[in-house]
Image (cartoon, rainbow, N blue to C red):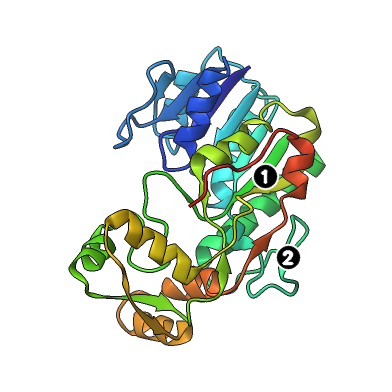
């Protein structure tokens, strides 16, 4: 198969690229060539800014793809742009959405692909929902061959905790120095963290999958951890026991709001403050070999 990844060198996508190459796929990466993560040697680079349609059309000239995956589309106008660019040159277009689009707190504790998409707290999630709605409209009305994938908290090159993490090393320094670190609520709500190598196993099984057209999937580990356990595991990896201080989630968001960090309402109150249990039956049905094997 001939696959085009828009992006392809990020925290989640790099594992999918590596696995695709290992499986013998012909892999193209369309990006600006500025990622801090080095691209795999066998991947073919198409250097262009996806937001510059003239650049993109030039590097795409003469190409047709079995699958196009956009890892970096966040707004409906970007999906519309992709439709215009790829409608005649791909057999499958995969939009990377987000599991943060699911309703939190959930009306039912088990999240399936049919759970409501509703997040009034986070513009990022609302934009992803709007993108999904446009994808489905283009599929229904124009036969555009879309598949939607919703990662949850997935890690490889980032520190996957709720507050003071991601590419910020501060939380590791604080743990090693014995300084207090904040864990929201009482730390007993449940969450799932997925390694990108595990995510890739499920995701790559959807590439070129004719029955996946028109469907949406989330792909996560089945491991359930409390946030206390997650922070303790991070501390163990850092070589020190974390000095955890529990603070109410809504109070954290209110303080963040007063200090220019209103995004905490979305990141925490609209997502990670609630217990979430993902039912992965659908991805396992479509990709029978999928199983997450890397414990946090």
Taking the spot 75% from the left edge, 63% from the top edge, the residue there is 115
Query: What mark, if any, has residue 110 been given in the picture?
Result: 2
Pointer 2 with pointer 1, Cβ within 8 A? no
Q: Position of residue 52 (x, y in %)?
A: 42, 35
**Total count of labels:** 2
Q: Is residue 250 left or right of residue 140?
A: left
Based on the displayed image, in which of its 4 quarters is residue 284 positioned? top right
x%, y% of residue 168? 28, 58
Residue at 42% of width from left, 15% of height from top? Answer: 42
Q: Observer-nearest residue: 253 or 125?
A: 253
Q: Residue at x 60, y 34 (%)?
A: 201
Q: Is residue 276 left or right of residue 56?
A: right
Q: Considering only vertical position in the picture, is 232 above or below 17?
A: below
The residue under label 1 is 148
Q: Is residue 275 visible?
A: yes
Find residue 254 and name its label.
none
Instruction: Tell me if 242 is positioned left or right of 194 in this view.
Output: left
């Amino acid at each position: 198969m001939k696959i085009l990844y828009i992006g392809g060198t990020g925290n989640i996508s790099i594992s999918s690229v590596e696995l695709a190459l290992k499986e013998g796929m012909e892999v193209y990466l369309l990006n600006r060539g500025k990622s801090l993560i080095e691209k795999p040697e066998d991947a073919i680079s198409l250097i262009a800014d996806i937001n510059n349609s003239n650049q993109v059309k030039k590097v795409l000239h003469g190409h047709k793809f079995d699958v196009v995956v956009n890892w970096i589309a966040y707004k409906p106008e970007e999906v519309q742009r992709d439709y215009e660019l790829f409608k005649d040159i791909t057999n499958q277009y995969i939009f990377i959405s987000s599991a943060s689009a699911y309703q939190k707190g959930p009306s039912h504790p088990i999240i399936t692909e049919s759970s409501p998409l509703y997040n009034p707290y986070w513009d990022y999630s609302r934009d992803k929902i709007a993108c999904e709605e446009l994808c489905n409209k283009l599929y229904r009305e124009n036969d555009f061959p879309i598949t939607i994938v919703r990662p949850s908290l997935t890690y490889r090159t980032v520190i996957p905790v709720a507050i003071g993490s991601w590419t910020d090393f501060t939380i590791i320094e604080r743990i090693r120095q014995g300084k207090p670190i904040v864990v929201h609520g009482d730390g007993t709500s449940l969450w799932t963290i997925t390694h990108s190598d595990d995510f890739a196993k499920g995701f790559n099984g959807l590439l070129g999958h004719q029955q996946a057209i028109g469907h949406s999937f989330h792909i996560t580990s089945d491991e359930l951890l409390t946030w206390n356990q997650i922070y303790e595991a991070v501390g163990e990896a850092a070589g020190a026991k974390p000095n955890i201080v529990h603070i109410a989630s809504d109070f954290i968001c209110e303080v963040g709001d007063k200090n220019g960090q209103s995004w905490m309402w979305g990141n925490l109150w609209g997502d990670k403050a609630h217990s979430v249990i993902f039912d992965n039956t659908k991805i396992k049905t479509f990709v029978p070999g999928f199983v997450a094997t890397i414990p946090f």
